[in-house]
Each structure stands twice: as C-alpha cells, then as structure tokens.
C-alpha cells in the first residue's frame, strides 16, 4: 500500500458551475500529492471528488446547489429504450456511414427520453470543472516523505468502514460481491423448470426472454464490411506523450469552446494537464486486482484514424469513477456522452468478471436542484450517497420527491442511523502529521513537542470530513 499525502485547505468559496451564482458554491478542499487507491475509494464514498490533484467535498447544507455522489450497479443495470436507440444509431453509422439526426421527443417508438431529444443534455459523467483555490501546496519530496511515514508507522491493511449492502442501504464497498454469471445461470434454470411444468405453451415467452439483447450484445457487433471502425484505446494517465498528444489537445479545446463556451485563451496545455492528466493516484497492481491495475487512465475513442472522444477514468477497488468525458461536437448526432457512459458501464461489467467487488460505476455528482444535471439519475440501478450517514440508497421517485421539497436532504430515513466511520476527538492522537521536510509524527507526539493549539481545529475538521479510517491512514501535511 502506498502512503497517501494531503494538505488540507479548509473552507472554499467560488462561483457555482451549475447556477452560475457568484461566490455561492461552498466546499472543503485539499491538495493530494499522492492517494492510495483504496483511500480514494473511501474518500469518494464520503462525498469527495478529485479534479487533477485537487480534491473537494461540497458543504451541502450551506451551498447553493447540493451535490450528491451517485453510482450505478453495473451488474444490475438494464438498458432503457433510449439507450437501445443510441446503441442502434451508432451501429448503423458504423455499418453504413450514414449520419442520422437525433429524433425529436415523441418520435420513433413513442418513448423518446429527454437525453435523446435534440438540444437536451447528454448522459455523461462530466461536471463543470471546479474553480481551484488561490493557494499553492507546500513543496515536498513525495517519495522521501512517503518513506518517512512508513518508518513512523507501518501501515496496516484496514478495510473500509462496514455498512449495510445495497439495495436497502448499500455499502461503500461490497461485503458480498455478486457475479452476474451465476445470476444468469439461475435465471435460465428457473425458466427451464417453468417450461417443464407448463409445457410447450411457455416456449414462446421463454425464447423471447432469452433473446433480449444485453449491453454487451449491442457493443459486440463488428463486421469487416462496416464503413467505419471504432476502436477504444486505454492509455495510462502518466503516459503524457499519448494523453497530451496534439489530437487530444485539439479535441479538448474544441469541446470546451463549443459545449461550455470557454475562453480559448484559458484552454492551454497546462490547464488540460492540471485538470485531466495529472493524478494523485499511483498505478497499483495487486494480485487480486484487475490485470490493468488500479489508477488513472484515459480511454481514447478512435473512429478510423480520427480521435472523436476521450473518457478520463479512475479504476478503484470497488468501482470505475468517471472523471471527465469530452468529445467532438461534430459527432453530437451519435449522442457520444450517453454512448461513452454505456461503454464505461460495459467496462465495469468486464472488470467484475475477474474482480467481483469492482461492480460499480461512479458518475460524479447528482444535482437535483439543477434540472439540466438530473440526467444522471436516468440510468437504472442508481444509488445516492446519504451526506450524513454515508450509506447508499436507491434513487427512487420517493427520494426525488423529497429533493423537490427541499434541495438538501439527509436521504437516510432512519433517524437513529449514524456514520459508522465517524471521527471522534478520542481518535485525534493517531492522526499522522508531516511537521517539516524531515519530521513525521502522530498528533499525540506533536502535542507533546509543544504543537500549536491553533492547528487542532483544522486537523479535527479535516479528520471528520475524511473519516476515522483515512484520518489514521493518510499523512496530513502540517507545514508553514
């Protein structure tokens, strides 16, 4: 396990990317020099999210637009009619090369969803990039500091705090991973038993069920006679020759200017690297993990020899977390935002075949108070994270109704439920601190050395936000 090293910035205030209000987006922020992949899994399961090396957590009870972490159970995911239309449209384009316009709402089979209507937002996991604080982190030698931390306290493998498993109240990490293969087998056995009881009269319905196309079926159609070839290339985020190639930079600029009306002067190579290439996650390849390992990657979508989309993702012990997705606006007729999300769900499903615990697809934040950002809740088998107990609840119409009444909600209906990973004052002594370039100590030792009392409030606030497990496992940079 690598050592996570962070510097806490405290409360941040900035322009909101959802309602465009000035200085009304309120959050907590910290710079991550390095994050162990399990630590980041635990952090996003407490409402944190990263943008480059900057990690932030919204102050949901106070901010203008509360943001709820949302995930999809990829093994329980079911395609909607709109999803199928988009997949068929892509397949027809690859086969025939014809550009079809998106149907207006109500056309086609009579059930066009909002994300499939002309001008409607795409189902993509991307949010506006957060405004970074005007602070510079302390300059440290990361490798040297990590060795100091290991010498101070040999890290032990701690599992994330236990919680109830979804779908009733889901957990941060599945306690009993479920593979989709046994489920399919059991379903087929039930159908065969039913057919044996009912006789030939059941054969028609059984055949219909068995022939229903899965996501994999739609994506596996490849014919050498197709007019176009679509290839998805996985690139390690650290491979800057490929993640920062001219084609990527040009695509990013085109997307940001056309879709987000960004100022072209601000869209430099350095800004793209800061947001989408740099990552605190170090690639890890444990024996029980996926073959590609955990860490940060880019999925490049190549149509013949042309780059048309890039998905920035983090592969973590329990999920694939979508960081950002950008595409060529000239290919908007293919609904690439939605298509990319479906591709990423399929990727999770493939990883889960060998690593059953890795079965979730994290889409970032669900912002119910911002209508144009509600599209993420359209994916089936989606769950929202309770911002107080950090348990997962299915995103139901009842939850939506509660959010209609008031934009901030506890979500967990059990008034007695508490955060099982809650940090308490008695846990303070074991928080690890970096005091200077050569000194690593826990808070108890720091206090005995005459530490500043004024530091305690910030350390306690940080520890409560990251939870007891991460507060004891990560290294808090406490340098002037």
Image (cartoon, rainbow, N blue to C red):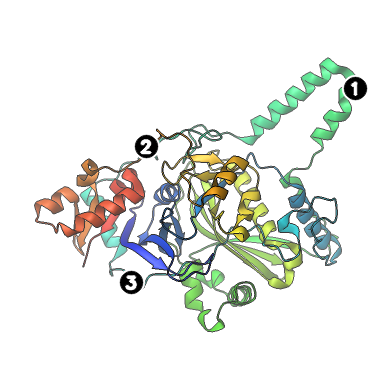
Q: CA distance from mark 3 to mark 1?
A: 71 Å
Q: Which mark is residue 420?
A: 2
Residue 369 in percent (x, y) is at: 55, 56
Residue 216 in percent (x, y) is at: 72, 46
Q: Is residue 23 left or right of residue 92?
A: left
Secondary structure state at the residue bearing disc 1: helix
- Report which quarter residue 92 is drawn in: bottom right
Q: Which mark is residue 135?
A: 3
Residue 91 in percent (x, y) is at: 80, 57
Q: Which mark is residue 201?
A: 1
Secondary structure state at the residue bearing disc 2: loop
Q: Residue furthest front?
A: 405
- Up the image or down, 451 lies above or below 287; here it is below
Q: Is residue 148 visible?
A: no
Q: How many numbered callouts?
A: 3
Instruction: Give the class, few, some or many, for how many residues have Cα within 10 Å of label 2's Cα (few <14, many ≥20).
Output: some
Residue at the location (66% across, 54% down)?
A: 343
């Amino acid at each position: 396990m690598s050592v996570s090293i962070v510097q806490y910035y405290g409360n941040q205030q900035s322009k909101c990317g959802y309602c465009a209000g000035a200085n009304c987006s309120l959050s907590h922020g910290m710079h991550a020099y390095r994050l162990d992949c399990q630590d980041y899994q635990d952090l996003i399961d407490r409402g944190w999210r990263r943008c480059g090396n900057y990690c932030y957590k919204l102050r949901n009870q106070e901010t203008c637009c509360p943001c709820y972490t949302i995930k999809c159970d990829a093994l329980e995911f079911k395609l909607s009619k709109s999803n199928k239309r988009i997949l068929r449209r892509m397949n027809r384009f690859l086969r025939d090369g014809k550009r079809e316009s998106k149907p207006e709402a109500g056309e086609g089979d009579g059930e066009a969803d909002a994300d499939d209507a002309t001008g409607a937002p795409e189902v993509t996991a991307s949010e506006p990039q957060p405004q970074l604080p005007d602070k510079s982190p302390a300059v440290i030698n990361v490798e040297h500091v990590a060795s100091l931390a290991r010498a101070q306290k040999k890290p032990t493998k701690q599992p994330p705090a236990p919680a109830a498993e979804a779908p009733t109240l889901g957990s941060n990490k599945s306690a009993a991973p479920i593979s989709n293969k046994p489920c399919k087998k059991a379903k087929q056995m039930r159908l065969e038993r039913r057919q044996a009881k009912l006789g030939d009269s059941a054969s028609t319905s059984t055949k219909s069920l068995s022939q229903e196309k899965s996501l994999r079926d739609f994506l596996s159609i490849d014919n050498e006679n197709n007019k176009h070839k679509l290839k998805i290339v996985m690139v390690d985020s650290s491979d800057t020759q490929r993640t920062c190639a001219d084609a990527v930079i040009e695509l990013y600029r085109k997307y940001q200017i056309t879709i987000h009306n960004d100022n072209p002067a601000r869209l430099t190579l350095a800004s793209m690297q800061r947001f989408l290439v740099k990552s605190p996650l170090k690639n890890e390849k444990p024996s029980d993990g996926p073959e590609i390992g955990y860490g940060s990657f880019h999925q490049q979508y190549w149509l013949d020899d042309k780059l048309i989309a890039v998905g920035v993702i983090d592969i973590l012990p329990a999920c694939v977390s979508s960081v950002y997705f950008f595409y060529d606006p000239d290919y908007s007729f293919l609904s690439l935002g939605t298509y990319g999300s479906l591709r990423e769900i399929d990727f999770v499903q493939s990883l889960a075949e060998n690593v059953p615990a890795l079965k979730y697809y994290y889409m970032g934040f669900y912002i119910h108070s911002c209508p144009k950002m509600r599209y993420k809740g359209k994916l089936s088998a989606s769950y929202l994270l309770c911002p107080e107990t950090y348990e997962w609840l299915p995103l139901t119409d009842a939850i939506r109704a509660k959010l209609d009444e008031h934009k901030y909600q506890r979500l967990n209906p059990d008034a007695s439920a508490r955060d099982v990973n809650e940090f308490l004052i008695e846990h303070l002594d074991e928080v690890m601190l970096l005091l200077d370039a050569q000194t690593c100590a826990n808070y108890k030792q720091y206090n005995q050395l005459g530490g500043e009392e004024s530091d305690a409030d910030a350390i306690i606030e940080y520890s409560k936000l990251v939870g007891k497990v991460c507060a004891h496992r990560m290294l808090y940079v406490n340098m002037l």
